[in-house]
Amino acid sequence: MSALATERSVAIQAVLQASRVCQSVFQHLVANETLTKNDKSPVTVADFSAQAIINTYLHKAFPNDPIVGEEDSKDLRGDAGKILREKVHSLTNGVLDESEKLSEDQILEAIDRGNYAGGAKGRHWALDPIDGTKGFLRGGQYAVCLALIVDGQVQLGVMGTPNLPVDPAKPDGEKGTLFITVRGQGAFQRSFSTPTETKIHFSDIATTEEATFCESVEAGHSSHGDAAEIAKLLGISRPSVRMDSQAKYCSISRGDGDIYLRLPTSKTYVEKIWDHASGSLLVTEAGGKVTDVNGKPLDFSIGRTLEANKGVVAANTKIFDRVLESVQKVLSSKL
Ligand SMILES: Nc1ncnc2c1ncn2[C@@H]1O[C@H](COP(=O)(O)O)[C@@H](OP(=O)(O)O)[C@H]1O
Ligand SMILES: [Mg+2]
Ligand SMILES: [Mg+2]
Ligand SMILES: [Mg+2]
């Protein structure tokens, strides 16, 4: 049996179920079902349900594994959280089998199992129940992202992208793609509906002029202006493809695009490990390279954040050095 085979299959089942709950919540979603966190990022019923489901699957299979999860149950507790708690409860159970159904208390407990501090020792999971919450709310791209980190290094990543076409050549065809990677074993995708996996890899372009850029929809998450200047330096004439979430890492890993830049918009924002763990491993296993904007490897060993890094540069290995050089040229001119 190959390394991490059990972890791989548990992660796939967990991410698939969580993706289904997201799809179900989206269908039921009305505007007043969202609430706003202090940091102004909208948190929905789906974020909580997806985290409850994945943490429950992980706990059943690996009771000793700690989890670094984005959400906590604070907003679901007490009288103030009653309405939201009931919605999370009914929508979560709506996708679970009879034998898997969870009580309200079990849901709260499961969500809060994601409170681990992370770090360099031993193994833990990193979970973003919905990455691209804004994309989810606008019916665009979002991703359910789960990674296993061992001794500070990402070893496994599974991402569910319910709105990403299975075949990029058929944008109106079946949607719902799962991306799967284990360190040293390559990068794969499959549809939600069929377990057959296909190996994926970067496109084989050799020059930056042929490249396509991917960037955040949210200009507050990554500077669109800096990206346009970098594109100019690289001789890129195609318009950038804007999408939310780690679907960007997925897209470049299967050759839909070639470069993903996350260009800091503030001096103080610190990236979170769950926003990059699974996506960055997918990229390297698909033949790409990832560093931060200073060319430093992403360091997942510090805790819940990528404190030692600034931004992200991910690209086809063949053009990576040129891309990084242009990123540094543009960013250093801003200092
Ligand atoms: N100022 C900022 N700069 C960079 N990323 C930010 C940010 N504020 C929030 N984010 C992160 O950006 C993620 C979405 O990225 P993208 O723009 O690529 O879709 C959010 O994940 P969530 O949606 O899981 O909260 C959030 O963690
Ligand atoms: Mg968030
Ligand atoms: Mg996120
Ligand atoms: Mg999230």
Image (tube, grey):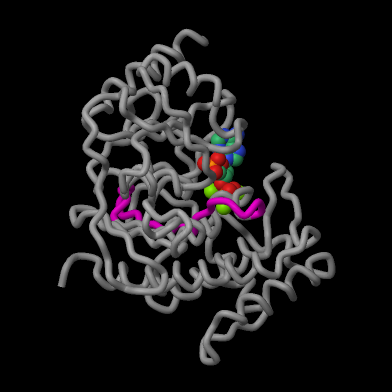
Task: Please indicate whether residue 304 sits to the left or right of residue 24 in the image.
Answer: left
As drawn, the residue found furthest toward the left would be 1
Q: Position of residue 322 (x, y in %)?
A: 28, 20
For the N terminus, the image quarter is: bottom left
Residue 198: image quadrant is: bottom left
Relative to 335, is 59 above or below? below
Q: Can residue 334 be seen at all in this image of the molecule?
A: yes
Residues rendered magenta in the picture: 137-155
Q: Nearer the viewer, residue 157 or 206?
A: 206
Q: Residue at x 61, y 61 (%)?
A: 47
Task: Please indicate whether residue 250 sits to the left or right of residue 182 in the image.
Answer: right
Task: Please indicate whether residue 43 sits to the left or right of residue 269 in the image.
Answer: right
In the rendered picture of this protein, how many numbered marks are placed on residues? 0
Q: Residue at x 43, y 31 (%)?
A: 261
Residue 147: image quadrant is: bottom left
Relative to 253, is 33 above or below? below
Q: Can residue 68 be seen at all in this image of the molecule?
A: no
Q: Position of residue 97 (x, y in %)?
A: 52, 87
